[in-house]
Amino acid sequence: MKKIEDYIRTIVDFPHEGIMFRDVTTLFADARGFRMAIDQMLHPYAGLEIDKVVGLEARGFILGGAIAHQLSVGFVPIRKKGKLPGTTISQDYKLEYGEAIVEIHDDAIQPGEKILVVDDLLATGGTAEAGIKLIERLGGEIVSCAFIIDLPDLGGRKKLEGMGMDVHALCA
Ligand code: PRP
Ligand code: ADE
C-alpha cells in the first residue's frame, strides 16, 4: 500500500533558489491519498475534547476544513494580513523564505476553548508559532498542532515543543 510520502512531490528551487518545496497538491488530488492523510491526522485525537480547529493559510484550510467536519466542530482561519474582513489581531513572523504577518478575527475563539492547530508543513515553525500566539492571546487552549510534513532540520518541532506544544506529523 502507498504511504503518505509517496503522494507528495518535491519541486526544486521553488519559490526561491535553494528551497526544496514539498508539494502536497498531488496528495490532495488523490482520493485515497487525501482520505489517508485526514484519517491519519485525526488518529491521535480520538476521544479528546476539541472545540475548534484552526487552519493556517493556505493549505491548512484544506486539511483543517476536512478535520473540523470529521470532528463536528467549527473551523477558524488564520490568514495573511489584509484578508479577513472583521476586526482582527495580528502577529508578525519569519519563515524559511521570507517574512509575513498573520491575522485572526478577534471574536473567533472564546477564552478556554480547546483548539487543534492544523497546517500541511512544519519548517522553521515561524508560521505555527505566530498562529499559536494569536490563539493564546484570545484565551484559546491549544490541545495539539497537526501537520502532514515535519522538516526536522529546520527546527520547527523543537521550537513548538519548547513552547509546551504537543506536535504530530505524518512524515518527515
Ligand atoms: C508554508 C506552509 C506553512 C509554512 C511553514 O506556507 O504551508 O504554512 O510555510 O513554514 P515555517 O514553519 O517556516 O513557518 P507558506 O508560507 O508558503 O504560505 P501559503 O500556504 O499561503 O502558500
Ligand atoms: N514552507 C516552508 N518551507 C517549505 C517547503 N520546503 N516546502 C513547502 N512549504 C514550505
Image (cartoon, rainbow, N blue to C red):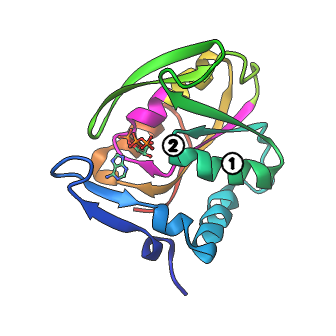
User: Going 76% across and 28% down the picture, which residue do you hit?
Assistant: 113
Ligand 1 falls in which quarter? top left
Direction left: furthest residue: 17
Closer to the camera, 116 or 35?
A: 35
The verdict on label 2 being within 8 Å of ligand 1 is yes
State left or right for residue 49 relative to residue 84.
right
Identify the secondary structure beneath mark 1: helix
- For badge 2, the amino acid type reads Ala
Q: On the rendered structure, is 14 left or right of 18?
A: right
Mark number for residue 128?
Answer: none
Q: For residue 92, say whether it is visible.
A: yes
- The answer to whether the residues at label 1 and label 2 have Cβ atoms under 8 Å apart is no
Asked where in the image residue 5 lies, by quadrant, the reply is bottom left
Is residue 162 something that shows in the picture?
no
Identify the residue at horizontal 52%, vertical 48% (top origin). Answer: 59
Residue 112: in magenta span = no
Q: How far from the left and from the top, in percent, is residue 72?
A: 84, 48
Residue at horizontal 47 percent and vertical 36 percent from the top: 128
Where is residue 34 drawn, in percent x and y? 60, 67
Relative height, residue 108 to residue 12 (above, below): above
Tell me the magenta residue range. Answer: 114-130
Query: Which element carries disc 2, helix, strand or loop?
Result: loop
**Residue marked by disc 1:** 65
Badge 1: how crowded within 10 Å, few (<14), some, or many (20+)? many
| Three-letter code, disc 1 | Gly
Please tell me how crowded label 2 is: few (under 14), some (14-19), or many (20+) other residues with Cα within 10 Å: some
Residue linked to disc 2:
58
Relative depth, front residue between 20 and 86: 86
Residue 169 in percent (x, y) is at 51, 56
